[in-house]
Image: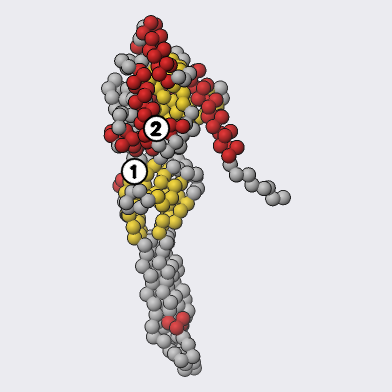
Amino acid sequence: MKFLDQAKVEIRSGDGGAGSVSFRREKYIEFGGPDGGDGGRGGDVWIEAVQGLNTLIDYRFKQHFKAKTGVHGMGRNRTGAAGAEITMKVPVGTQVFEEDGTTLICDLVSEGQRFRLAPGGNGGFGNAHFKSSTNQAPRNANPGLPGVEKIVWLRLKLIADVGLVGLPNAGKSTFLASVTRARPKIANYPFTTLHPNLGVASIDGREFVLADIPGLIEGAHEGVGIGDRFLGHVERTRVLLHLVSAQEEDVAKAYRTVRTELQAYGEGLNEKPEILALSQADTLDEESRRDKYAELKAASGKTTYVLSAITGDGMTPVLRALSALIKQAEAAEKATEPQTDEQE
C-alpha cells in the first residue's frame, strides 16, 4: 500500500430540516390549530483514530465528505429525523489543521479518540412553535440552519518507539529489514527511501516499533528535501537511533549535520535519548573501521556502537540498548502521569 502522510479534504455537515406549516384537520374538530413539526438536525462530520491504518492514502481518492440533511418536519407534530452523520477513519497520530495549514484543530494520539469537525445545522421550528394567545393560527415556520462547510488538512505523524535518523545511504532501511519483517526498498543510491516505513523488532522477549524515515540533508528543518515532513514522523518516538555510515569520508561532519537539523527543527527532537552507531562497518578493513569509530566517538562524546546489518555484527548490543532506553522512557512517562484517586 502506498504511503501518504498529508491530505487535503473538504467537509460539509448536513443542513437542518425545515419546519412544517400544518393544521389539524379532523372531522368534528372545527378549530384544530397548528400541528407543524420541527425539522431534524443535520448530520455531524466526525473524525476518529483507528488501529489497522498507517497511511492517509484513502483520502487521495476521496476528498469530499458530506453528512446528510435533516428530514423536514411534518404535520401531526411530527419532528423530522436527524440527518445521518459521517465519520472519517484515520490512523492514530493524525493531526487536523485549518485550511491555512498552521492552525491545529485536533491531534488524535490514541485509538478510539474522536473529534467533531463540523456540527450539523439545527432544524427549523414548525408553525406549532409560533402559536400564541394573539396568533392562534400561525402560517410561518423556520427553515433549517445550514451546515458548516470547510477545508481541512490531515497530517500523519507516525507513533513509534524508535526513530531511525541519519544522512541518505546510512543503512537505515537495511537495518530495519534485518531486525523486522518490514521490506523497504534498498539500493546503493541516496533517497532510496521516499516515505517512512514501520517495523516491529524483538529482543529478549520484548517488542518495540521502529520508524525508518528518508535520509536527512542540510536544511531539512526548513523543508529542503521535504525533510520537515520527515522529521515530523520522529516527533513522537521515545528514542532515536542515529546511524552514521562508515563509508562517509568525514563521519564527524555527518554526525554534526544530522544533530544540527534535529536541533533546528525543535519539538524536543534534540533532547530525545539517542543511540549512536557506525553502520555498514563490513565495508571497511579493521584499521579503517577503528579510525572511523574513534573519530565518531570523539565528535559525539557518546557511547558509540559499531554494526553491520549485512553480517549481523553488533546488532544485538544495539537492540538491547534501544530496549533499555525505551523501558526507561516508559517509566519516566508513567512517573509524570497525573495520579487519580481510585473510587471504591
In this picture, is 98 found above or below 338? below
Quick one: label 2, few (<14), some, or many (20+) residues within 10 Å? some
Q: Indicate the position of residue 1 as horizontal and vertical percent values.
A: 35, 37
Is residue 302 visible to us here? yes
Q: Is residue 122 above or below residue 229?
A: below
- Callout 2 amino acid: Gln
**Near-viewer residue (87 or 333):** 333
Q: Are marks 2 and 1 in contact (CB under 8 Å)?
A: no
Q: Which sits in the foreground, 302 or 185?
A: 302
Residue 58 or 192: which is nearer the viewer? 192
- Residue 27 at what x, y percent from top left? 47, 91
| Type of the residue with mark 1 | Gln
Could you tell me how far apart the alpha carbons at marks 2 and 1 are, in whole angstroms? 24 Å
At x 38%, y 12%, the residue is: 292
> On screen, 282 above or below 254?
above
**Residue placed at 46% from the left, 74% from the top?**
79
Q: Which mark is residue 263?
A: 2
Mark 2, mark 1: which one is toward the viewer? Answer: 2
| In the image: residue 341, left or right of residue 13 | right
Determine the secondary structure under disc 1: strand
Q: x, y (%) of residue 124?
A: 41, 74
- Per the image, the residue denoted by label 1 is 6
